[in-house]
Image (cartoon, rainbow, N blue to C red):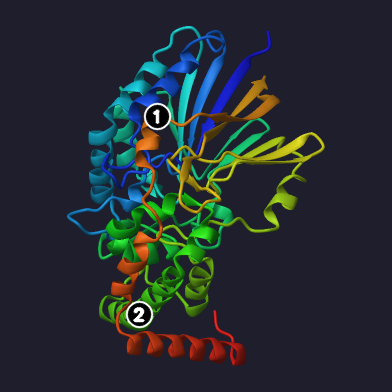
């Protein structure tokens, strides 16, 4: 008899510590979402819940008021504990989901660029324990393949946030650390110390309009990165021989080009879509990371961007009001592990999202002006950056 299987895929929930900095504090909303898969019309079919990266926003969780970039399993477990303290009902909901007795239930946690800590075996064991100890929780790493369905977070196609899949960990001074992408290291060192002043900006779309309305924001980003590159980074590298300090001018310039606070605009290699839809062994290819829901078809094959579950807000045309953006996920139906149907599904944000509407963008201008420093220093940085770019044109470097 044919086996019907439903795979529900959520990306970029970004649960954190439950405070104002948490991009998804709506635990009960997520629990209610999970519980629907133990009800009609899913009662008599197998169901897989796939948390496709950035389920947890470990990236932004401080440890003793610091955001270290050398992350071992001890630090990772502290971050997980902080998430559990704020979202313990989520872990209980997973336990309830897996306790369904009529058909198989499975949960998969894929690593993303905000939660690579789930690659640590100790973190995996703790997640399983927090979810009731089920043997039906899986950690496939950076991607998951079920028949002709392929799922991955998407950061592996983004030059800023790509992991080396063969070397996700490094050994340094007798400890095992995550081998973080260079852009993540830069974010942790440069942008996170300013997070309390600007955390809301990362939730606003369209980003281009935000930059237009806060003209000094881009200058602040560039000057902060430049100061890091020419002063703090080089001194720290020479002093500690830090194994993750491997940024180059070319890398820094790419971060500058994207010009968005804390979470530089994520991008997928422009050749990715053309390449993937021609993979004959994959009928549906699901990615997250981009936060924008999107479907591209080629005959009977699809690439689906799942959008995101975290709170995001649209700055409307009046440039003053904000509207919560609907949350999206992907649902795929398989028969004998072959895709028969796939959908991108939109759901209404929780009522609490409306209470988290950001403040007006104009309020940031004065804050940024104070952080930019003197006009003399700003001019000096500007001239140094222009000189570096002129030098690169004559003698390109990586």
Q: Percent from the top left, x then y, of residue 158?
A: 56, 58
**Placement of 144 over or under 100, stated as above or below:** below
**Placement of 170 over or under 317, stated as above or below:** below
Badge 2 marks a residue whose secondary structure is helix
Q: How dense is the environment of label 2, judged by Cα within 10 Å: few (below 14), some, or many (20 and up)? A: few
Residue furthest left in the image: 64
Badge 1 marks a residue whose secondary structure is helix
What residue is drawn where x is 47% and y is 37%? Answer: 309
Residue furthest right in the image: 299
Visible residue check, residue 131: no
Residue 314: mark in rendering: none
Whichever of labels 2 and 1 marks the residue nearer the N terminus, that label is 2
> Given contact means CB atoms under 8 Å apart, are the residues at marks 2 and 1 in contact?
no
Quadrant of res 330: top right
Q: Percent from the top left, x then y, of residue 141?
A: 47, 43
Query: Is the N terminus in the top left, top right, bottom left or bottom right quadrant?
Result: top right
Residue bearing mark 1: 351
Q: Marks 2/1: CA distance?
A: 42 Å
Residue bearing mark 2: 227
Q: Percent from the top left, x then y, of residue 39?
A: 49, 10
**Placement of 115 over or under 355, stated as above or below:** below
Q: How dense is the environment of label 1, judged by Cα within 10 Å: few (below 14), some, or many (20 and up)? A: few
What residue is drawn where x is 32% and y is 52%? Answer: 60
Judge by depth and name the residue closer to the eye, 138 or 224.
224
């Amino acid at each position: 008899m044919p086996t019907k299987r439903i795979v529900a895929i959520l990306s970029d929930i970004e649960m954190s510590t439950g405070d104002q900095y948490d991009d998804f504090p709506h635990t009960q909303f997520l629990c209610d979402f999970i519980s629907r898969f133990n009800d009609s019309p899913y009662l008599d079919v197998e169901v897989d819940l796939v948390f496709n990266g950035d389920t947890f926003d470990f990236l932004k969780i401080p440890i003793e008021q610091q955001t270290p970039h050398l992350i071992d399993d001890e630090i990772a477990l502290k971050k997980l504990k902080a998430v559990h303290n704020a979202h313990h009902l989520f872990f209980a909901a997973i336990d309830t989901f897996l306790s369904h007795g009529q058909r198989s239930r499975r949960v998969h946690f894929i690593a993303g660029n905000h939660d690579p800590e789930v690659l640590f075996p100790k973190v995996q064991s703790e997640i399983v324990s927090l979810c009731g100890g089920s043997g039906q929780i899986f950690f496939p790493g950076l991607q998951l393949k079920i028949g002709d369905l392929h799922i991955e977070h998407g950061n592996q196609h983004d030059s800023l946030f790509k992991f080396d899949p063969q070397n996700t960990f490094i050994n340094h001074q007798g400890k095992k650390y995550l081998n973080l992408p260079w852009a993540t290291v830069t974010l942790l060192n440069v942008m996170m110390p300013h997070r309390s002043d600007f955390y809301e900006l990362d939730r606003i779309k369209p980003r281009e309009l935000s930059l237009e309305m806060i003209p000094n924001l881009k200058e602040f980003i560039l000057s902060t990165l430049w100061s890091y590159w020419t002063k703090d980074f080089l001194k720290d590298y020479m002093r500690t021989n830090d194994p993750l300090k491997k940024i180059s001018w070319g890398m820094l310039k790419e971060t500058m080009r994207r010009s968005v606070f804390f979470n530089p605009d994520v991008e997928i290699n422009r050749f990715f879509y053309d390449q993937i839809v021609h993979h004959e062994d994959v009928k549906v290819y699901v990615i997250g990371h981009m936060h924008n829901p999107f479907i591209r078809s080629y005959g009977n094959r699809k690439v689906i961007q799942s959008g995101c579950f975290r709170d995001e807000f649209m700055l409307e045309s009046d440039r003053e009001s904000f509207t919560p953006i609907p949350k999206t996920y992907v649902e795929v139906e398989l028969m004998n592990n072959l895709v028969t149907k796939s959908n991108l599904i939109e759901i209404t944000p929780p009522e609490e999202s409306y209470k988290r509407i950001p403040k007006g963008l104009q309020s940031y201008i004065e804050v940024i002006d104070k952080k930019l420093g003197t006009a003399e220093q700003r001019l000096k940085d500007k001239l140094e950056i222009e000189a570096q770019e002129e030098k690169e044109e004559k003698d390109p470097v990586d």
